[in-house]
Each structure stands twice: as structure tokens, then as C-alpha cells.
Image (cartoon, rainbow, N blue to C red):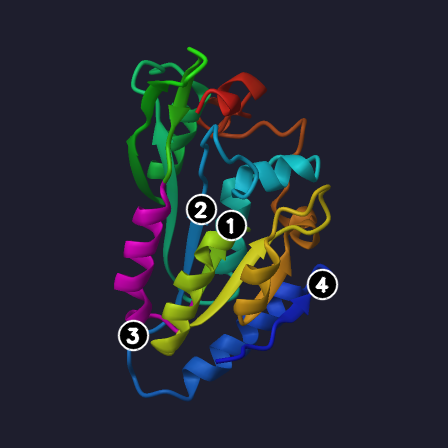
Amino acid sequence: GVHAVRLLGAGAAHRHLLQHLVRRGARRRRRRRGLRVGIHEERRHEAPGANLHAAARSLNFDIDYRKLLNVFKNEGKLIRALYYTALVEDQKNSPIRSLVDWLDYNGYTMITKPAKEYTDSSGNRKIKGNMDIEISVDAIEMCDKLDHLVLFSGDGDFRRLVEAIQRRGTRVTVISTVHSHPPLAADELRRQADFFIELDDLKEQIERSSGERDDNELFHPKVSENDRSSI
């Protein structure tokens, strides 16, 4: 079917959406329903850019994942937040692994798998890590238990997944950006979603302060350019 896309802007955009969901859920019977935040963080060398980390970096800020989680905890019933990434096995001291450890202890469900290494036709070493299948399987399995699913991705390959979830009666919000150059949110994904929220509009609430020092400093590092490009 045809789905109208609401482009939600300004700092209170997500609150409008979540308040709507809370009212909608209150009218239902006493069934366990709620919000699920799917954090889609793909770091793959072949097709970078559609993931949450790349989107934030294109807008010149780093995400504080604690603040991100609290945005949804404070405005609705958060069922689960899932974070997806492939890991290079020989990079045990990578900042990415430290971030994964911190997220695992601080409210996120981590979905990881080993990245695959290969040599291209020019003899260059490449690393491949694609989590699309894992994200799709989890979303389909969980959507019947949810009122709403929030997908942090601009990848147009997820358009068909969003359509399948909607047919099961679950609404889908996509969060990415069209303010980058080029835009990271695929037009077909934005059209399919029930709601689209511009990531730039959430910046004030989820940005990691440059001078911020807190108890997660050792396990919530900023990922360097080298680490991002190698995975």
C-alpha cells in the first residue's frame, strides 16, 4: 500500500511521535506492547555511509549512546535497543571493541559477528561486514510484540523490510539524515516509513560533548577514522 511520510523536524519531533504512541497503546487491552529501538551500526568498507555512526559524523558530531537510549526511555516504554556491528578478530584493542563492551553493559543488546577478510582483484586487502540479514531477521521476529519499531539507517535495501513489518501492523520510524552531502537517507526508504526523523534535529539531545568526562569515558571512546575505514 501507499504510506504517508511525516517529516518531523525541530527538537521536539520525536516527543510528538512517542506521545502519540503512548496514547495509542493506552487504548489497547492489557497487552505487553512498547517501543523497540533498533540501532543499526554497519561498518562495511564496500558501502559506507548509510549507518548511524557515519550519518552522525557527516553532521559533525559524535553520539552519546547513553543519551540516545534515554531519549526513548523517557518518552515511552522501551522494549529493547539492539546494536549491530561486525568485528575484526585481530583488533582486540580497537576502540570499537571497547565501545561494544560499554554498550553491552549499559542497556543495549549487542549483535555481532566476525568480519570477513578477502583480497580483491587488484591484490588489496578488504574487510567485509554486513549485518543486514541479522537486522531483518530480528525485526521480523520481534515486530508482532511491538507497537512501533525505530530503525536507525538510511539504507534503501531496508525498504522491503519496512513494508513487511508494516503489513504485520507495526509502525516504523526511520532516523537518518538528508542534511549531509550527499544525503544518506535513501528516498525509497523515507517514502516507505510511517515517519522519518532527521538525525540533525536530535543533535542537541544525543551529542557527546567534547569536554565531557564521565564514568564511561574508558569504554565509550570516539572511534578514529582508521578504525572506521578498516571495518
Residue at the image position 58 percent from the left and 20 percent from the top: 225
Start-end of magenta stretch: 131-148
Position above or below: 96 against 14:
above
Please tell me whether mark 2 or mark 4 is closer to you in this view: 2
Q: Tag 4's secondary structure?
A: loop
Q: Quote the CA–CA distance across marks 2 and 1.
A: 10 Å
Q: Quote the CA–CA distance across marks 3 and 1.
A: 30 Å
Q: Is residue 114 left or right of residue 212?
A: left
Q: Quote the CA–CA distance across marks 2 and 3.
A: 24 Å
Q: Residues within 10 Å of mark 1 (few under 14, many from 20)?
A: many
Q: Amino acid at mark 4?
A: Gly
- Nearer-the-camera pick, 168 or 83: 168
Q: Quote the CA–CA distance across marks 2 and 4.
A: 21 Å
Choose the circle earlier in sequence order: 2 or 3.
3
Choose the circle earlier in sequence order: 2 or 4.
4
* Quadrant showing the C terminus: top left
Q: Tag 1's secondary structure?
A: loop
In the rendered image, which residue does mark 3 sit on?
32
Q: Are marks 2 and 1 in contact (CB under 8 Å)?
A: yes
Q: Is residue 22 left or right of residue 56?
A: left
Residue 211 visible? The answer is yes
Which label belongs to residue 9? Answer: 4
Please tell me whether mark 3 or mark 1 is closer to you in this view: 1
Q: Residues within 10 Å of mark 4 (few under 14, many from 20)?
A: some
In the rendered image, which residue does mark 1 sit on?
155
Position above or below: 113 against 98:
below
Q: Amino acid at mark 1?
A: Asp
Q: Amino acid at mark 2?
A: His
* Quadrant of res 41: top left
Which label belongs to residue 40? Answer: 2
Q: Amino acid at mark 3?
A: Arg
